[in-house]
Amino acid sequence: MTSQDSTSTLAPTRPLLFERAEPSTMTERAERLYTCLNKRRSVRFFSEDPIPLDVVRTAIQTAGTAPSGAHKQPWTFALVTDPALKRRIREAAEQEERETYDHRMSDEWRAALAPIGTDAHKPFLETVPALIVVFRKDYDLDAQGERSKNYYVQESVGIATGMLLAALHHAGLGTLTHTPSPMNFLAKLLDRPANERAYLLIPVGYPSETCKVPDFTRKSLSEILVEY
Ligand code: IYR
């Protein structure tokens, strides 16, 4: 028996249809993507200008191509553009964030955030044209309410979210990975089923004309790569 032998539970297979590119083409593609993604920054000042929502939908479709444990695809992406809902999300997020900044954060954490200058004030949650709430599904629920477990959910949803951020940036939109904590108000406000837990809140829009970002540098390749 090999894993390629047919059994009753094995999924049908098809040829991969993979085309090898010339090494020079591969280098060019790798460098072009690096140059593009190296320009991505967390945006905290957004324009109120409308954005093409189909671009966002396609980016979400791209996120959905991520690998996942046992191909369970344990994610849901909620796209929120309704102004009243955005306002309620802002209010609830700021309430949690005030508690976090005033009481829950350790002094060490507060010091780590000081250079970024964040606080509990999150006006962009209301003014940005779109919010994407990423939900993780630790289990699936069938129509009868039966649970089936998902696997490596943290890893799977993390990879999908990374692909989403890359796709949105590549398409020309700014994003923020926002983590109001705890985030359970999001499942409540969006009326999500019991198996969905908020993973990340991502404001999406054009950066404002006057948007500034911390003048950070990234670690060099030699600092993040060890070769054996
Ligand atoms: N969730 C808070 C705090 C925060 C935490 C980290 I770690 C950051 O890199 C940035 C912010 C907030 O969004 O303000």
Image: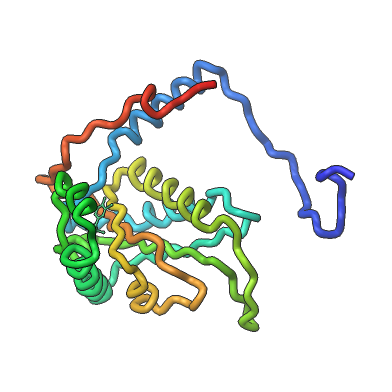
Q: 156 or 65, which lies in front?
A: 156
Quarter holding ligand 1: bottom left
Which of the pair 76/220 is nearer the observer?
220
- Residue drawn at 24 percent across, 61 percent down: 129
Residue 175 in sight here: yes
Residue located at (24% from left, 74% from top): 92
The number of discs equals 0
Pick out the residue farthest to the front.
107
- Residue 32: x and y in percent read 39, 27
Q: Residue 74 appears in which quarter of the rendering?
A: bottom right
Residue 45 rendering spot, x and y as whole percentages: 16, 52
Compare residues 101 and 162 and report the one nearer the observer: 101
Q: Residue at x 68, y 36 (%)?
A: 17
Query: Image height check: is 214 above or below 88?
Result: above
Q: Position of residue 86 (x, y in %)?
A: 25, 70
From this view, report whether residue 124 is shown above or below residue 5: below
Residue 90 placement, left or right of 28: left
Q: Residue furthest left?
A: 210
Q: How is the image coloured?
A: rainbow
Image x and y of residue 213, in percent = 17, 42
Side (left or right) of 200 relative to 19 = left
Among all residues in the image, which is located at the extreme top?
24
Quadrant containing the C terminus in the rendered view: top right
> Residue 73 vs residue 49: left or right?
right
Image quadrant containing the N terminus: top right
| 201 vs 97, nearest the viewer | 97
Residue projecting furthest to the right: 1
The answer to whether residue 207 is seen in the rendering is: no
The residue under the point 62% across, 25% down is: 20
